[in-house]
Image (spheres, rainbow, N blue to C red):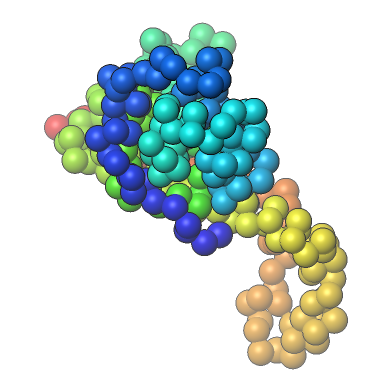
Amino acid sequence: MTTTESSGSGDVSRSMELLWGTGERATRGPKPGLTLDRIVTAAIELADAEGLAAVSMRRLSTELGAGTMSLYRHVPGRAELVDLMLDRVQGEGAHAPEPDAAEPDAAEPDTAEAAPGWRKTVERAARDELALYQAHPWLLSVNQTRPVLGPGAVGGMESMLAGIKDTGLSDPELISVIIMVSGYVSGVARTQVHAVEVRQVTGISDDEFWRAQEPMLSTVMTSGRYPLMAALSPEAFGPDFDHFEFGLQRLLDGLEVLVEQRTKR
C-alpha cells in the first residue's frame, strides 16, 4: 500500500485545538445539525468503505447533505481532518489498565503466573492494534512518523505505560517498547491488508494463485537444487499456524529476559 498521506501535514496548532476542544466552535451555518463529530464520523465511515483517497471535503458534504463551505466552518481542511480521524480511531483501541493486572487470576493461576501484568498489557495492546488495522485498513496509508497527539493517542500511551511502568525499564526504554510492539503489529497488519486487497483487485483466490505455480514449483523442488525447501512439511505454509501470535510471544519472551534482569537488581 503506497503512503499517500502524512499526519500533521496541515495546521498543527489548529488540529491540536480541535482535538483537545480548545478551538472556536461553529455556531452558525446553513446546516445547524452539522457538528465536528458528525464530520469526523462520516469521514471515517467513508475511509473504511472506500479508502482514504475517497475522503474529500466535497464528497463529505454530499454524504452529510451539507454545503462544502459549511464543513470548513468546523475543520480547516482535509489535512486537519485526517489528524482528527486518526486520533478518533486510535482512541477506540485505548483501554484502562486492569486493576488486578499484576495479581494471579484465581480461575487460571498457572496462566497468570506465566504472564505477569506488563506482559498481559503488551499482549492486549498488540491484539487491539491489529484489530484496529483490520477495522480501518486506511490507517496503513498514513505516514505517522510525526503524529499529532490528541486524546486518543495520549490516552492509549497512558494506558500502556500504566501497565508496563513496573518493569524496571528506563523512560526511553518504555517508549521503545511501545514503538517496538507497534512496529511489529503494523508489519503483520500490512501483510494481512495487502492479502485482502490483492484478492479484491485480481479476483483470484489464494488457492487459485498457488495452484497456478504448482506445476513449475513441483519440478523445481524435485531437482535437488533446494533440498531444505523441498524437505519442508505441507504444514509449513499452511493457514492454520498463527504467525502473528508466534512472533508476538517470542518478542515478549525476549523482553521478559530484560525485565527479569532489571527487577532482580
Residue 133 occupies quadrant: top right
Task: Locate residue 85 relative to residue 47 in the image: left or right.
Answer: left
Residue found at the far left of this picture: 265
Residue at 49% from the left image edge and 13% from the top image edge: 105
x, y (%) of residue 146? Answer: 30, 47
Q: Is residue 241 left or right of residue 104?
A: right
**Residue 200 rendering spot, x and y as whole percentages:** 76, 56
Residue 143 makes an appearance in the image: yes
Please state the total of marks drawn on the protein image.
0
Between 202 and 227, the residue placed more toward the observer is 202
Residue 160 occupies quadrant: top left
| Image-quadrant location for residue 38 | top right
In the picture provided, is 89 more to the left or to the right than 205? left
Res 44 seen here: no
Residue at 84 percent across and 71 percent down: it is: 211
In the depicted structure, whether residue 144 falls above or below residue 30: below
Front-most of residues 212 and 194: 194
- Does residue 202 sit above or below 260 in this rendering? below
Q: Is residue 139 left or right of residue 122?
A: right
> Percent position (x, y) of residue 90?
45, 31
The spot of residue 251 in percent (x, y) is 42, 46
Between 191 and 86, the one nearer to me in the picture = 86
The image quadrant where one finds the C terminus is top left
